[in-house]
Image (cartoon, rainbow, N blue to C red):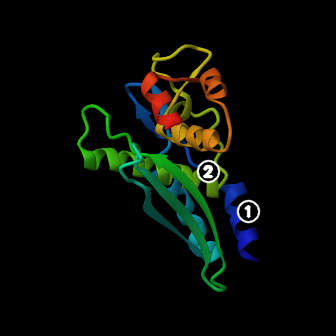
Amino acid sequence: MNINEKLATIQTQFKSKKSRFNSFGKYNFRSAEDILEATKPFLLKLGVNVVITEELTAYSSESTVPILKTIATITDNETGEKLEATALVGVDLNQKGMQVPQQFGSASSYGKKYALGNLFLIDDTQDSDASNTHGKETASKQKLTNESLAKAKEYINKGGSIEAIKAKYVVTKKHEEMLTL
């Protein structure tokens, strides 16, 4: 079995319940730890290992949002073949009630969860963790998160319009300034 077949086996047989509860948002979710725990039975059975790496990719005087790049890699222990998936997550340095290490830790956990989700094809489209609005925005528009803000900035840099972003997201004046710099 090659690395693609081994990964496909995990992707099709993977089961991880949303065993954690967010009391603020009142929803169940799965964490990166839950995902890793669910993959452990496959590691020895298929002769693979999974490694997660992170790097700070954007942090300068021009960047108002530090970006963490998280890479989840699966490696075939026999052949050394590798496949990987990436997640980019912004670090919210204005998150109230958190110290800087907690802000980075929160972004790190989120990045790990989504890199693993991308690698193992975990469909979280119905995951409240991804869509919960906490009642803070209108029903027709989504909250502009650090991740979607980074994607929106990339979209605009490639010629997209701010109006298209405003049609989909709640955009504050601060967000607009960040997007049009």
Quarter assignment of residue 153: top right
Q: Nearer the viewer, residue 134 or 12?
A: 134
Element assignment for label 2: loop
Element assignment for label 1: helix
Q: Nearer the viewer, residue 155 or 148?
A: 155
Q: Position of residue 16 (x, y in %)?
A: 57, 48
Q: Is residue 181 above or below residue 75?
A: above
Residue at left 53%, top 34%? Answer: 180
Q: Nearer the viewer, residue 179 or 152?
A: 179
Amino acid carrying label 1: it is: Ala
Tag nearer the camera, 2 or 1: 1
Residue 74 appears left or right of 177: right
Q: Is residue 35 above or below residue 48?
A: above
The residue tagged 1 is: 8
Amino acid carrying label 2: it is: Lys
Q: Position of residue 101 (x, y in %)?
A: 27, 50
The label shown at residue 15 is 2
* Mark 1 crowdedness (10 Å alpha carbons): few <14, some 14-19, many ≥20: some
Q: Earlier in the sequence, mark 2 or mark 1?
A: 1
